[in-house]
Amino acid sequence: MDINFNKNEDFNKLQVSDLKRKLLKVYKGGGEKRIEKLHAKGKLTARERIEYLLDSDEKSIEIGAFAGHGMYEEHGGCPSGGVIVKIGYIRGRQCIVVANDATVKAGAWFPITGKKNLRAQEISIENKLPIIYLVDSAGVYLPMQDEIFPDKEHFGRIFRNNAVMSSMGITQISAVMGSCVAGGAYLPIMSDEAIIVDKTASIFLAGSYLVKAAIGESIDNETLGGATTHSEISGVTDYKAKDDKDALDKIKNIVSKIGESSKTGFNRIEASIPTEKPEEIYGILPKLRTDQYDMKEIIKRLVDNSEFEEYKEGYGKTIICAYARIDGWAVGIVANQRKVVKNAKKEMQFGGVIYSDSADKATRFIANCNQKKIPLVFLQDVTGFMVGSKSEHGGIIKDGAKMVNAVSNSVVPKFTVVIGNSYGAGNYAMCGKAYDPRLIFAWPSARLAVMGGSQAAKVLLQIETATLKKKGEEISEEKEQEILKTIEDRYDSQTSPYYAAARIWTDAIIDPLNTRTWLSMGIEAANNAPIKKQFNLGVIQT
Ligand SMILES: CC(C)=CC(=O)SCCNC(=O)CCNC(=O)[C@H](O)C(C)(C)COP(=O)(O)OP(=O)(O)OC[C@H]1O[C@@H](n2cnc3c(N)ncnc32)[C@H](O)[C@@H]1OP(=O)(O)O
């Protein structure tokens, strides 16, 4: 056992407690007062609605709980991006649920709300998962309309997706569960079927104030677009529910009758738990991101029976490639080894760094997994590709490019777990967000940035010093320290996993002990969407 095991364990457990504390705060959404206001109207909160809808809230995973974390403070904040997204089961059917949080500015859409809704639709599209929208939204958050209204990744894209998803045969069901105005009004009606709750829900393109201002008509919101109006006069909605629970029961009934779709056919056998204790991950994972550890010890605590078959074990050792099972599913693991290793020439290779041989091995392994229809799991703790003349002359760029090519063109689903560092092009080659992982989630120990804080500070300082030199000026020692500190501090706050999760660069920050559940549910989702494309690497440098 590592001499630091106990210290690491204490530290990592504290990190997980801090995560849970932060989550409890996030779960309060816009705060107790607003929750009470909803309850007084006879409405449930977004989280209560989801809890009632899912067979078991415990068997669910939440996407983007930290979306908007620490952002828009000048507007009062936007916990969970004002919309709750969970993957779970309704009457045994895996679905994705999207529920506006009316306690956050009446469910109005901030820019991050748009990004999160698009991510939820992307997950639904990629996995052919039925999607349920519990709509309670005031439409665009008007003070920030320029950042959410017209662009391709903005609000309009949601309705375009509603239409495209429908044509793809993906089930979309909506319940109108509050005041749904303008942008909030299109989405439910572009779904296959829409339920509306009597008295507490309404839906219209423009509310009574705007109608009065625009055309001088005086009308109350209920007559303009309440449940009776839309169920009996306009025909806009399909079912009238007496309250929130009745609406959610109606969704359960609809979902229970959806027919089976064809499966991808990923290999699965009966699951076994790891024989090495998963809790020991806390003691194995070092406190400092610069410290070494053996990633194989982590893998043993994630896979069934703690068994894995290593591919090219003796070659390209800074990346571990292995076949294993997670909750019975066959997977191909690509993981950064975080301890120093030696190559065949007995040369030392740094842990967490991608060398030509490791990139070459990973490329071939990824191709194998594609050939055999085996989902890929990336375990990231990567500081980047090896630099320096030896590496450059050895062609690291072309070997790295080969790996990036294989990751990009993979047709099997990819899942990324950010365990530790996720720096530079290492983030890309190890299937960062830009490489379409079906799910990407981080442990509290994750750090994501183009490079580490102290490295970035040193590089920027050299650039600044060179610029001043060209002008015939010199930088004082004091100024130098000041610049270094400012840059390091900024980078340190930006590399935090919470900064990344706030911007949906990752889907979640999770307790490492939940990793198997996330991967298993992710593969189960992916098993719904048969692979239609051929694996083709295009032009690749050998
Ligand atoms: C995409 C397209 C094509 C267009 C659009 O979406 S344009 C957006 C149009 N939306 C509206 O005009 C809705 C305006 N809001 C309302 O009419 C009402 O807020 C309501 C009927 C939706 C809900 O009323 P409720 O009494 O339940 O809640 P409020 O107290 O009115 O609001 C709570 C809180 O949210 C702020 N709020 C509400 N809507 C918006 C919005 N669209 N943009 C920015 N802020 C909004 C409201 O000011 C209040 O804030 P405070 O708690 O800070 O006072």
Image: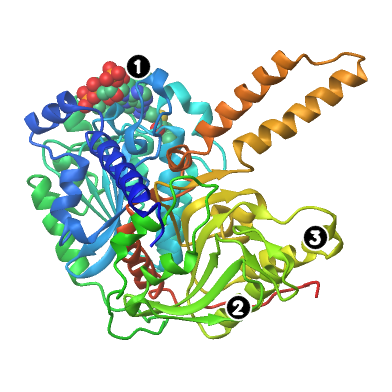
Badge 1 or badge 2: first in the primary sequence: 1
Q: Which residue is mark 3?
A: 391
Residue type pointed to by label 3: Ser
Visible residue check, residue 162: no
Residue depicted at x 16% and y 55%: 53
Residue depicted at x 32% and y 71%: 276
Residue 510 point in image, percent of width and height = 34, 51
Q: How many marks?
A: 3
Quarter of the rendering occupied by the N terminus: bottom left
Residue 525 point in image, percent of width and height = 36, 69
Tell us which disc is closer to us: 1 or 3: 3
Tell us which disc is closer to us: 1 or 2: 2
Residue depicted at x 54% and y 45%: 448
Q: Is mark 2 within 8 Å of ligand 1?
A: no
Image: 71 above or below 129: above
Q: Which residue is mark 1?
A: 213
| Crowding at mark 3 (Cα within 10 Å: few <14, some 14-19, many 20+) | some
Image: 302 above or below 470: below
Question: Residues under labels 1 and 3: Cα distance?
Answer: 69 Å
Residue type pointed to by label 2: Phe
Image: 302 above or below 281: below
Badge 3 or badge 2: first in the primary sequence: 2
Tell me which corner region of the image, top left, top right, bottom left or bottom right, holds residue 47.
top left
Residue 43 point in image, percent of width and height = 12, 37
Question: Residues under labels 3 and 2: Cα distance?
Answer: 22 Å
Task: Please tell me whether mark 3 sits on a helix, a strand or a loop.
Answer: helix
Q: Nearer the viewer, residue 403 or 359?
A: 359
